[in-house]
Image (cartoon, rainbow, N blue to C red):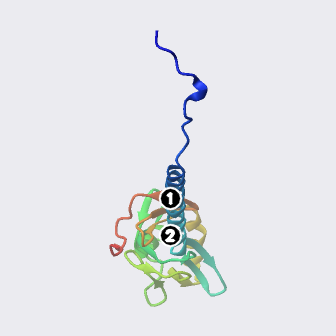
Amino acid sequence: MPELEDETNRPKKRLDPNWVLALCAVGISFMALWVSLYEVSIMRQEERAQVWPYLDLSLSYSGDGFAIVARNKGTGPALVGNISLELKEREYTDWLPLLDDVLGSDHGVTYATLRVSDISGEVMSPEEELDLFAHPWTQPIRRLSEIIPEGKLKACYCSIYDECWSVVGDKRAVTESCPGAPVSQPR
């Protein structure tokens, strides 16, 4: 019967130091790759935050008169889609039909005293503020200013990265797209 080798006489297998160094180098390379990818994701988030629009629609009451105001409170341009007012189950994108429906056709408000801006399809710069509707105080405008808060101002706008939001009253939600918004340039 062949003699069994003694376990103690067998040469011990040692790890080759070159293999150990190579495995450490591969591990460090993977960690460096992960850190780089993480930094890129943070930079993308920062880039988006630097051009984030925030469109605010509000009613303004002053000594001069009544106004419906749009303001971009964000840090980037707002690509505005559509803006409207929903009142009594009807949606208005033009102000004169609203005046006719709410105040009657003999309201006396004309373009001579009415200041109107249509920013649908336009770009609003950061901190830009525009009166969508403004009129000095008259009796019909006082009635209008009491009725309009019953409705909901609506808007849809996008960032230059085609991230879009819709605003209905004081609620804001992310949306896929905004009809009528200017198209941002491809990067």
Q: Nearer the viewer, residue 108 or 129?
A: 129
Q: Earlier in the sequence, mark 2 or mark 1?
A: 1
State the residue at coordinates (56%, 35%). 12
Amino acid type of disc 2?
Arg
Q: Farthest residue toward the bottom? A: 112
How far apart marks 2 and 1 lie (CA) works out to: 29 Å
Q: What quarter of the picture does the C terminus occupy?
A: bottom left
| Residues at marks 2 and 1 touching, judged by CB atoms closer than 8 Å | no
Q: Is residue 115 visible?
A: yes
Q: Check disc 1 and report the residue beneath it.
A: 29
Find residue 83 and report its horizontal and vertical position in percent.
Answer: 44, 69
Find residue 19 and report its horizontal and vertical position in percent.
Answer: 50, 50
Amino acid type of disc 1?
Ser
Q: Tag 1's secondary structure? A: helix
Q: Check disc 2 and report the residue beneath it.
A: 48
Q: Farthest residue toward the right? A: 63
State the residue at coordinates (51%, 51%). 23
Q: Nearer the viewer, residue 141 or 105?
A: 141
State the residue at coordinates (45%, 82%). 116
